[in-house]
Amino acid sequence: MPTFGRDEELQWLRTHALEGRAVLVTGAAGVGRTHLLGALAEQLARAGAPVGRISGGDGASAVPFAPFAPLVVEHLPHAAGEQVPDLEVFGRLPGRLVATGHVLVIDDLHLLDTASQVLVAHLARAGLTLVASAPGRGTLPSALRDEVDGATGRRWSILALESLTDDSVLALAAEEAGDELAAPAGAFVVTHAEGNPRVATELVRGCEVRLTSYGAELGDLEVSPVLDELVDARLEQVGDEARRALDLLATAGRAPRDLGGSAAVDELAEAGLVEVDDTTVRPADLLVARVRRTRLTPRARRAAARDVAEAMASRREWSHVECLMRQRAGLPVDAARRLQAAERAAAAHRPEDVVELLRPVVDEVVSPHVDLMLGSALSALEHTDEAEPLLERAAAGPEVPTRVRAGQELGLLHAVRRMDPAAAVVRVEKVADTVPDPEARLPLEVDLVKWRLMAGQPPAALPDVPDPSDHVARANSALLGAMVAALDGEPEVARREVAIGLSAAAATDAVPPHTGDLLRLSAYLADSFDGRLTDAERRAQALRRRAARTAHPSLGMWEYAVAEMSLHAGQFRRARVLASRAVRHLAWRDFTGLRPSATALLAAAVARQGRPSRAAALLEELPPDATADVKVALHVARVEAEQLARAGDATAGADRLAEVAMRAIAESHRHLGLLALDESLILSPGHPRAPARLEVLASAEDLTPVLHLLTERARALLARDADRLVSCAEQLLDLGLVGRAAHAFTAASDLLQESGRRDGSARAHRRAVLLMTETRGAAWPLPSPPPVLSAREFDVARLAASRLRSKEIAEQVGLSVRTVDNHLARVYRKLGIAGRDELAEALADLS
């Protein structure tokens, strides 16, 4: 039974149960108490422990001991068919269960009938192993609270369950749906469940699931009794007027502050159901809003849409919502206001709204601008056959800005959505030829740089960038500069261009909506290549989480970017998980052309985890000529190098990596190429061409601290200088490159062992083991990687290093003394030390 982010809690419970302890699991309704106890019971049963499962919900019957009936009948055989006195159950059943070594798993302890609660107290005093759940200690009757607190005997351990993380909710939902969720479905589940696994499960079960190439889509929600009950409980404190206002707000999504009356809004805010600022109110509890909207009849929905539209009339800042509401209410919508609303929806990255607003009038309004807006929205929604003629018509229009934007969108349609960058080059060049002004043509020239690189064409000369005063040209020239500097130049130049570009893009709505996202991606790459991986990672994760919760088109881009850096940092499992999601979400929305690269990256991560055959199968999914994009070629080379190395030919694997690395350097992807070249040196440092490859790496060592350090590490590796390798390993760790640091420690350990410096070799070995234990990273390439410590071994080792005795450690972590000593024995063996006296020194260098 999967636990979806509860692995540590399950291990903690299992340890306590096998040690004969009593535990109370607490947490709000739906947080996963029942599921976790079910997983525990399964594990204990597989381990051979006799397990009894009790449901407190059975206590609703009027029969005393009803939840315990199977156990009473089994262990008091004469009870079958006759009533057993309460005193006999209290007096004899605890001893019988203790004698058999039973573990009793009790869900919803607070719902047991009175007699069963008294029995639980007797079982606890008899020393039976108990794992029970309740919303909180305060929900138990006083007698059981005293038992839990240890007033009459042993004190129970308490495990308080927190809400699941977004990623754990998505994993649970994927299990229920049968596939990873598409981005909109994922955003829907994450934002409505808010970490509650029961709600997440009910949401998926309440929707029709449709499996697509970009993940599982969810249809309309059918509200289940469980969701009804949860929502009704949250609405208990608000009156009818407030509920009516909530229905209007659920229909609109967000609205003016006074929608439904200020008193009603204040009541909703006090109940935590809405968020209010000076001018706007929006739902705070999205589950309640969604269920309320779903409950409305079609007629009531139209009426609510009409009321919202009337409330927003003559408010220019709400014109886009008003127009949508009028259309959904079946009311006429003025053409001019419809166009304004579509423009606002486009600026807000709402292509669905643009299509809803413009599709009814596209045949009536002859306008290249309308063709451009509708074609761009349809293309973003992957309706490319319908979008292309509209964009072609816009590209033939009289206005130069419209032609340029249409050319950009045609490039995206062919290069990204149809994955045919060569066709994009031809089409964008054709549009560019109709724009003689270099300044106006600049956005197309910027795009052509990307599409030519993706198509594997000879890198064209970068366009001459004028010194414009208008924001559009400044944003486009900065984007070009940032992209080039981030991949091929100085990180500081990239950061400067990003700042200029973001400032210019914020001052105009005439640039593509994804311009800011691409600029932030350039900043992330520049900081990562510059050795600022920790800060870059923190910002990227915040952007990824925001994109996941809003189903923003940048989601796949951020998943890919973080997966790429995770691969280089040696976090192969994380790279695999994120790359897998990136593949799906880029198939749903992509403005980067990274879809084939994501598949190849996933294959590389899988190969580095030791599954080269699965990686090869993934590469078969790539479109023809995908390796024309050097980013794809680099990851394909990683898979091929892994296959060659595992077949015993690391030299050939290094050659394959170096070949594509040199191509990447020549094609203006210098930073990615040099990372691959460094990998070829790691794979085969004794290669005859290794010194020449080191020279190429060294030629760029002054560009960034990362390249300088990789060059130093490569020099030490080729010179077999163990002391320099250890020094480089420490610095690599500081930069966040944990995989390369672990490899350097391991290589140094081998060299020190060969030279007879056993103490130094043992210390370097311990650093590699503890580094991989602490970071869950991986040292590559190693035929037999150093063994990592388990989470429990790591905890015990830390406590032992602080001079605690085994008995004290056992009391603190809830284990027996014997189990603690067994853990320590395994720790000593893995770290290569003699005993406790050496442990403090071994762990001294941990962060």
Image (cartoon, grey):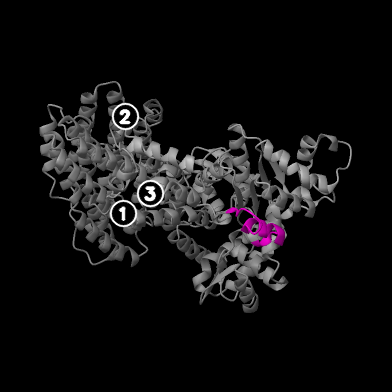
The first of marks 3 and 2 along the sequence is: 2
Q: Which residue is mark 1?
A: 534
Give, as a single range, the part of the protein colored magenta: 138-157
* Residue 306, above or below 37: below
Q: Is residue 20 visible?
A: yes
Q: Is residue 622 left or right of residue 149?
A: left
Looking at the rendered structure, the kind of residue marked 3 is Arg
Q: Position of residue 605 (x, y in %)?
A: 36, 36
Chain-order first, disc 1 or disc 2: 1
Q: Is residue 744 left or right of residue 198?
A: left
C-alpha gap between disc 1 and disc 2: 29 Å
Observer-nearest of 318 and 238? 238
Q: CA distance from mark 3 to mark 1?
A: 25 Å
- For mark 2, what is the residue? 784
Q: CA distance from mark 3 to mark 2?
A: 25 Å
Check disc 3 and report the residue beneath it. 798
Give the structural element (helix, strand or loop) at label 1.
helix
Circle 1 Cα neighbour tier, 10 Å, few/some/many (<14 / 14–19 / ≥20): some
